[in-house]
Image (cartoon, rainbow, N blue to C red):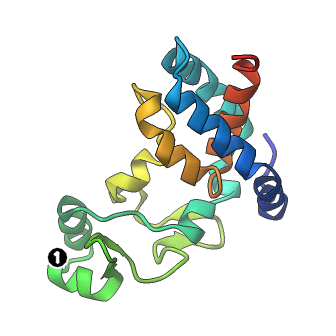
Amino acid sequence: MQAINLRSFRQKVRFNKKRLRSFLSRIEKNTPKGLDTLTRSLEPEVWKEVDCLTCANCCKTMSPTFTKTDIKRIAKHFGQTPEAFTKKWLRKDRSGDLLNKVEPCQFLNLEDNKCSIYEIRPADCSGFPHLPKRRMVDYMHVHKQNIEYCPATYKLVEKMEERLKGL
């Protein structure tokens, strides 16, 4: 497994993003039989090639959406009220979702790319990058966005495109 070179990754994304998003749109409109089985079989291949700790681009450039449950759990860990935690660390976006005030994530250790609250991290973080979903087609909109941020998602879509060539 090689370390992720974010500069190289960004160049690949710039060059291939439009093609990969178009591919995802095509399979979203005309879902091939066995797509879910295919993606489940490709996921282990992806994780053999991608080490999140050499990347952490998601934590550096995105914010999870914090649920009330996340906030209660994390605030308790810090000995704060949910209100105090929210005031200190979070902001509301236009749709009312609670997100980090800062990027990179305040809980990311930039020395080793490890999360300082890994065991109690937001549900959005623990599910990211949402590769092993039962109905892959329901997450196409998420993958269209995430190919730009996550090398694992990018790799999965690349592998899907290769396996589904000619369909």
Could you say where residue 37 lies in the image, as x and y percent from the top left? 52, 15
Circle 1 crowding by C-alpha within 10 Å: few under 14, some 14–19, many from 20: some
Compared to residue 77, the image places residue 131 above or below, namely above
Query: Relative to residue 19, is residue 121 drawn left or right?
Result: left
Q: Residue at x 17, y 76 (%)?
A: 82
Percent x, y of residue 86: 25, 80
Q: What residue type is labelled 1?
A: Pro
Q: Nearer the viewer, residue 142 or 100?
A: 142
Residue 106, position as x, y percentages in the image:
47, 78
Taking the spot 42% from the left edge, 58% from the top edge, the residue there is 118
Toward the top, the furthest residue is 33
Q: Nearer the viewer, residue 72 or 78?
A: 72
Q: Relative to 98, is 32 above or below?
A: above
Residue 129 shows up from this direction: no
> For the N terminus, which image quadrant?
top right
Q: Is residue 108 left or right of residue 14?
A: left
Q: Is residue 133 above or below residue 82?
A: above
Q: Mark 1 points at which residue?
A: 82
Q: Residue at x 29, y 71 (%)?
A: 95
Residue 126 in the figure: left or right of residue 27: left
